[in-house]
Amino acid sequence: MKTVGLIPAAGMARRLGRLPCSKEMLPVPGPGGVLRPLCADLLGAFAAAGIREVFVVVRQGKWDIPALLGDGADYGLHLAYLVTDPTNGSLETVDRAWPFVRDCRVALGFPDLRFSPRDVFSPLLERAREADVVLGLFSTDEPERCDLVDLAPDGTVRGLEIKPRRPRLRDTWMFAVWNPVFTELLHRHAGSGVTNAAHDRHVGEAVQVALREGLRVRGERIAGGRAQDLGTPQALARHWCGG
């Protein structure tokens, strides 16, 4: 089964206020201190795992993303852009790719993360041989802002808590790999809700449905993994100057 990458990049970045560019294009230090787009970590992760074809779902107006990334050749990738009207969260954004990825294994990553190690997808692809969905797990210091994963000793995901008010877990998922069975479930769930601008719809909702319907959902803790969401002013400040 062919594996393709998927990047949801249609968000409004409201948490960051007014920006001179798309959030995914914010300059951050790379190797040797050279500035590069925030999404470069994710592009490198796809390449490191041998995933060459990547779909980027962008909102109309975020033309700086294809203008800077081009066809992906600089990153060893083949990038294709899917242009959408504004969506109501990551669930709807990811679902916009359904006609193009429905027969593929999908590797999902979010473009506003800084993380290590570079190759986060290979262990998930290995585990995907025995699962419908595999979640790449990291420990978090901000559990109230995350999807928290209840992981059994054998790697089975027992439950998922989306941004709980009183968190009791510390594992959160940052990456995922899934097969067409889950793609269809996500597509069905994305079309089942009534759009409500006051409530963003999250991919984690589809994972919860998958658990209820008995799909094989596994978690894989990334050995030595560290990840930081730079989608808030506080996180950007810590990243740039430790403040």
Image: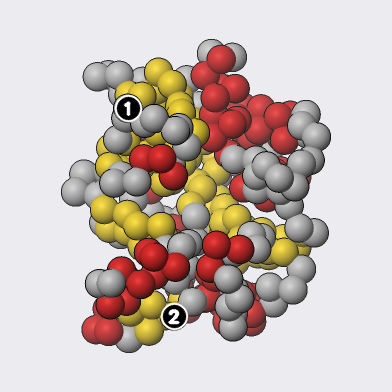
Seen in the picture, residue 13 relative to 167 is either above or below; the reply is below
Disc on res. 6 = none
- Distance from disc 2 to disc 1, alpha carbons, whole Å, reads 35 Å
Q: Can the viewer see residue 37?
A: yes
The crowding category of the residue bearing disc 1, from other C-alpha atoms within 10 Å (few below 14, some 14 to 19, many at least 20), is few
Residue at 64%, 79% in the rendered image: 64
Residue at numbered disc 1:
168
Seen in the picture, residue 89 relative to 45 is either above or below; the reply is above
Residue at 54%, 24% in the rendered image: 208
Seen in the picture, residue 31 relative to 170 is either above or below; the reply is below
In the drawing, does residue 45 fall left or right of residue 200?
A: left
In the drawing, does residue 96 fall left or right of residue 158?
A: right
Image colouring: secondary structure
Name the image quarter holding the C terminus: bottom left
Residue at 41%, 40% in the rendered image: 144
- Give the amino acid at mark 1: Arg
Q: Residue furthest left?
A: 224
Q: Can the viewer see residue 130?
A: no
In the drawing, does residue 110 fall left or right of residue 61?
A: left
Q: Could you say where residue 188 lies in the image, as x and y percent from the top left?
A: 74, 29
Name the image quarter holding the N terminus: top right
Q: How many marks?
A: 2
Seen in the picture, residue 20 relative to 136 is either above or below; the reply is below
Q: Residue furthest front?
A: 165
In this view, the residue in front, 141 or 159, is 141
Q: Could you say where residue 53 lies in the image, as x and y percent from the top left?
A: 56, 58
Q: What secondary structure is found at the residue carrying circle 2?
A: strand
Q: Could you say where residue 181 lies in the image, as x and y percent from the top left?
A: 61, 27
Q: Quadrant of residue 203?
A: top right
Q: Quick one: label 2 or label 1, which is nearer the N terminus?
A: 2
Residue at numbered disc 2:
27
